[in-house]
Amino acid sequence: MIFFKNYVDGARKVPFSRNDIVEAANQLNIKLPKNIGDVIYSFRYRTELPKSIIEKSPKGMEWVIRPAGTAQYVFEAAQSAAITPNQKLAETKILDATPGVIEKYALNDEQALLAKVRYNRLVDIFTGLACYSLQNHLRTAIPNMGQVEIDEIYIGIDKEGVHYILPVQAKGANDKLGIVQIEQDLAVCSTKFSNLICKPIAAQFMQNNLIALFEFEETEGGVVIVSEKHYSLVSPEELSSKELIKYSKRSLN
């Protein structure tokens, strides 16, 4: 209903506003959540768009919902919008350093994932930097985007003393990573941390203790994946000397 209100044949961008959502809900007698942004979030990362909308996407492309200012959004045709772990990628076992009390009381997948990444120093291991958590759930306003949120943000330092900013997006096994969040993270870094080198990171549970990590960079053709690793958090008896020898051979390649 909202999409077709502003759609014209062949369009690659279809703008809409938060007020459009309220008006459509009233017409259809649908009760909205208190945070209307949850509706946008759901269609970005959890729920497929209706088939009637999907069918209107240009050939070889798919619709993403991008922010376009305060309470303003746009359906935009994009290539490869979803980010999914490579199921054929090798796993690397890491001895699980997550405190038992955190395991016991973690409330949801996203929070549990952020905690496991933090306590196991996975961002440090993945990037090769010494990383420090600066803030989680950072909310800020960006020009031409409006309010955005980063799940956690790290400061990294390399062996030469160079400083990096690493925004991290986290998703549970049932949610989808999307390119829009990475674009927002890059915009935050460019606006708020312009003197630091930005390395956008995403993390996703594949299984209970198997975590996929991605690093991205911005190119002329859009955001691309530059690195992906899968880390399995295990107990000491699950990591053999044979596997450690195998990992040492990897590092020589």
Image: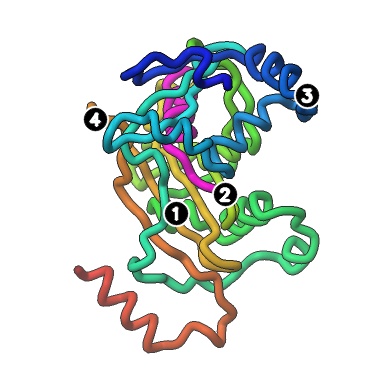
Q: Earlier in the sequence, mark 1 or mark 4?
A: 1
| Secondary structure character of the magenta stretch overall | helix
Mark 1 and mark 4 residues within 8 Å of each other at the beta carbon: no
Secondary structure at badge 1 equals strand
State the residue in front, 100 or 8: 8
Say above or below: 70 vs 175.
above
Secondary structure at badge 3 equals loop
Tell me the distance, in whole angstroms, between the alpha carbons under discs 4 and 2: 26 Å
Tell me the distance, in whole angstroms, between the alpha carbons under discs 2 and 1: 15 Å
| Tag 4: amino acid | Gly
* Residue 217 percent coordinates (x, y): 32, 37
Tell me the distance, in whole angstroms, between the alpha carbons under discs 2 and 3: 28 Å
Q: Which residue is at a point 42% across and 31% down the rendered structure image? A: 63
Q: Nearer the viewer, mark 2 or mark 1?
A: 2
Q: Residues within 10 Å of mark 4 (few under 14, many from 20)?
A: few
Q: Residues within 10 Å of mark 2 (few under 14, many from 20)?
A: some
Tell me the distance, in whole angstroms, between the alpha carbons under discs 1 and 4: 22 Å
* Residue 153 percent coordinates (x, y): 55, 37
Mark 3 and mark 4 residues within 8 Å of each other at the beta carbon: no
Give the labeled residue for mark 4. Answer: 221
Q: Earlier in the sequence, mark 2 or mark 1?
A: 2
* Residue 242 percent coordinates (x, y): 37, 88
Q: Nearer the viewer, mark 2 or mark 3?
A: 3
Tell me the magenta residue range. Answer: 175-191
Q: Earlier in the sequence, mark 3 or mark 4?
A: 3
Q: Which residue is at a point 60% across and 67% down the rendered structure image? A: 208
| Tag 1: amino acid | Leu
Tell me the distance, in whole angstroms, between the alpha carbons under discs 3 and 4: 42 Å
Give the labeled residue for mark 2. Answer: 175
Q: Nearer the viewer, mark 3 or mark 1?
A: 3
Render colour scheme: rainbow
Q: Nearer the viewer, mark 3 or mark 4?
A: 3
